[in-house]
Image (cartoon, rainbow, N blue to C red):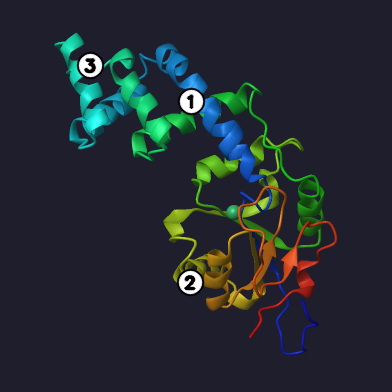
Amino acid sequence: MTLQSPMDRPISHVLLDIEGTTCPVSFVADTLFPYAARRLEQYLQEHAKEPIVRERLRELFACWRKEDNPTAQALLSAALSKQEALAEPQTNVVLPYLLWLIAEDRKVTPLKDLQGMVWEEGYRRGELVAPLFTDVPETLRRWHSQGLVLSVYSSGSVAAQQLLYAHSHAGDLRPLFSHWFDTRSGPKQEPDSYRRIADQLKVSADQILFISDLIAELKAAERAGLAVLFSDREGNPQRNPETFPMIHSFATLDPRHCHHRS
Ligand SMILES: [Mg+2]
């Protein structure tokens, strides 16, 4: 971080990654995914009559029939031998495939949708609470009160981002954010995604500060003209900032003193 020249327009917008930046990476890996795996069977039984659940089961069954993996095919043969009429696949029929997908960490859309539904219920019940890094809530409030425009850019869906911030340990933080971006704006490793976001924010790229823990994302954002900071937090997979300026906390950070390295 160097001092601005008088030519620079000051940062007015902060664009934030979530995992590894505002929330520990371990929350997703060690809490959210195991919670969904644990709850899924019971959730499907409790909501078996709901049209949306039946639709997801039908979609899963269609995926299963298209599988060329031998294990998935063997599970399918076993399921088919137990039940003749599969026009309307039941939870107990699809479950072996679901558990296999989870064990293999396969990201099939109907499974992701079902996981999202389980998480939503878990947050609403208070069984899931997003453990943001301790400095994050008060800093976001400070930046917001200073007039900085805050947005989220995460590869998790906008629905998942909003659930997380609605149920943080510091309460519902959604009102602090004015925009939410996910991969519908494009992949986070591509400069065009950041150009699109700047367009949507109706601001010049150099007035946006992007903070993330992944070098590939910082490189893409910097190429699009954004100011960037590397987030180094406990538990992150990448701890080497390469040439990027690095922060370990938001507590003493004033985004208005950051700028694009051109
Ligand atoms: Mg991240």
- Helix, strand or loop under label 3: helix
Q: Which residue is mark 1?
A: 37
Residue 223: horizontal and vertical position, in percent? 53, 77
What's the amino acid at mark 2? Pro
Q: Which residue is mark 3?
A: 79
- Helix, strand or loop under label 1: helix
- Alpha carbons under labels 1 and 3: distance apart: 20 Å
As drawn, 202 above or below 53: below
Residue 252: horizontal and vertical position, in percent? 85, 61
The tag earlier along the polypeptide, 3 or 2, is: 3
- Alpha carbons under labels 3 and 2: distance apart: 46 Å
- Helix, strand or loop under label 2: helix
What's the amino acid at mark 3? Ala
Residue 204 visible to an observer of this rendering: no
The residue that appears at 67% across and 64% down in the rendered structure is 230
Q: Quadrant of ligand 1?
A: bottom right
Residue 200: horizontal and vertical position, in percent? 52, 65
Along the horizontal axis of the image, is 17 left or right of 159?
right
Residue 67: horizontal and vertical position, in percent? 22, 35
Few, some or many C-alpha atoms within 10 Å of disc 2 (few <14, some 14-19, many ≥20)?
A: many
The residue lying toward the viewer, choosing from 20 and 210, is 20
Q: Which mark is residue 14?
A: none
The residue that appears at 77% across and 58% down in the rendered structure is 248
Q: Which mark is residue 191?
A: 2
